[in-house]
Image (spheres, grey):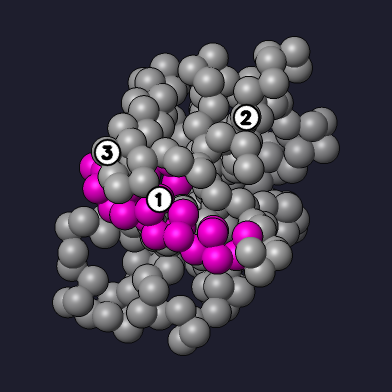
Amino acid sequence: MPGFFPRAENLDFPGPGSGPGWQIRGMAPAMNPSPSETDLIERVRTGDPAALGQAFAHYRDRLRRMVVIRLDRRLQGRVDPSDVLQEAHLDAARRLGDYAREAKVPPFLWLRTVVGDRLVKLHRQHLGAQMRDPGREVSLFRDALPAASSAALAAQLLGKHTSPTEAAVRAERMLRVQDALNALDPIDREILALRHFEGLSRSEAAEALGIEEAAAAKRHVRALARLKSVLAGMPGGLDGL
């Protein structure tokens, strides 16, 4: 298995010819929207309901990843991510006029906020006071969202292996990485969740956190370094990762 951590020069968006170092999974490349997506974005900004439906379909997979990683483990099996998205779509339709009047963020990040609000409501509905765990909510600027699951993050960072032998080894690695993630500060886990599971670009992660893009990039590099340090100090260290 290739090394878990990339070389320092490959921590953030390695490009062609950047060398053979292993690359962290799940990051979205920094790229400009296609002409068709740009047109869709502008139509959503004007409050076009048809464009909203198209945008929701266009971003559905990314929004679903957000739901999967942030849905409380106690609700898994009771709440279907598809139902969460369906309710969030209805919420977005009701809030489209308000968004069009201000449109301070791109449609994807606005839809992500709408989905996050729906998740918070579901958690309150099903868990009540049990959801009030400060360690499960992270926010630097905007309203807090349910925190990302360390188990889901560990699975994403390690990737998938299908053979029985690899499955047994992966299970041991999963526990080690999950313990390391739980030892991180919540904001470090959050930046890793945004970049490596939700697949937000550097600029999108910065917008989601309400901080400058350069600051988000620095936080990301520091979070990876802290994760590596925590893992190195655990029994078994970085062996096999």
Residue 78, labelled with which disc?
A: none
Query: Residue drawn 40% across and 50% down?
Result: 177
Q: Is residue 126 visible?
A: yes
Rendering coords of residue 31 (x, y %) = 69, 26
Query: Residue drawn 33% across and 74% down?
Result: 123
Question: Which secondary structure lies at badge 2?
Answer: loop
Q: Which residue is mark 1?
A: 177
Q: Tell me which amino acid carries mark 3.
A: Gly
Contact (Cβ within 8 Å) of mark 2 with mark 1: no
Q: Is residue 103 visible?
A: no
- For residue 40, side relative to residue 99 (left or right): right
Identify the mark nearer the N-term, 3 or 2: 2
Mark 2 surroundings: few (<14), some (14-19) or many (≥20) residues within 10 A: some
Boundaries of the magenta span? 166-194
Quarter of the image holding residue 184? top left
User: Mark 3, mark 2: which one is toward the viewer?
Assistant: 3
Outermost residue, right direction?
36
Q: Which residue is mark 2?
A: 22
Identify the mark nearer the N-term, 1 or 3: 1
Rendering coords of residue 52 (x, y %) = 67, 55
Residue 233, labelled with which disc?
A: 3
